[in-house]
């Protein structure tokens, strides 16, 4: 077995964990996470700029940050260079 094949096999398990965690978060979002956080977000007013920033920041943390962390620490690449 070549070293490239061994590296791919060792990176496969963290990828599966990322995909499963993403789907669990996606399922938990409307039933567990959002109902607990949404009333607190409404205290700033749902038509304010602060509400939009908080809502988008929360979504970025749940959906984008895990992919960036995966690219950085598992694939060992710079995420911005990876996109370019």
Image (spheres, rainbow, N blue to C red):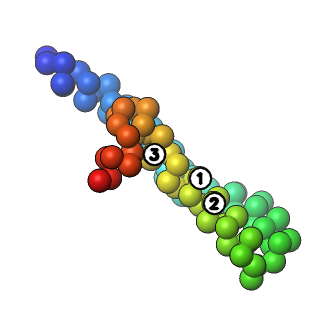
Q: Quadrant of residue 5?
A: top left
Q: Pointer 3: what residue?
A: 68
Location of residue 2 with respect to 71 vertically, above or below: above
Give the left or right position of residue 37, taking residue 71 as reference.
Answer: right
Residue 53 in the image: x percent, y percent? 67, 67
Q: Secondary structure at mark 3?
A: helix
Residue 61's tag is: 1
Residue 26's tag is: none
Residue 9 in the image: x percent, y percent? 27, 27
Q: Pointer 2: what residue?
A: 57
Location of residue 59 with respect to 1 vertically, above or below: below
Report the residue that reaches farthest toward the left.
1
Q: Quadrant of residue 68?
A: top left
The front one of 71 and 23 is 71
The CA span between labels 1 and 3 is 10 Å
What residue sits 52% from the left and 49% below the top? 65
Residue 60 in the image: x percent, y percent? 56, 58
Decide if residue 28 is in sight here: yes
What residue sits 82% from the left and 65% below the top? 40
Q: Secondary structure at mark 2?
A: helix
């Amino acid at each position: 077995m070549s070293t490239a094949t061994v590296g791919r096999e060792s990176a496969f398990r963290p990828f599966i964990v990322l995909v499963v965690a993403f789907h669990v978060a996606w399922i938990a979002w409307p039933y567990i996470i959002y109902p607990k956080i949404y009333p607190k977000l409404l205290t700033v007013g749902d038509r304010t700029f602060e509400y939009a920033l908080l809502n988008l920041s929360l979504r970025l943390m749940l959906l984008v940050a895990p992919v960036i962390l995966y690219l950085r620490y598992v694939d060992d690449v710079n995420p911005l260079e990876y996109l370019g």
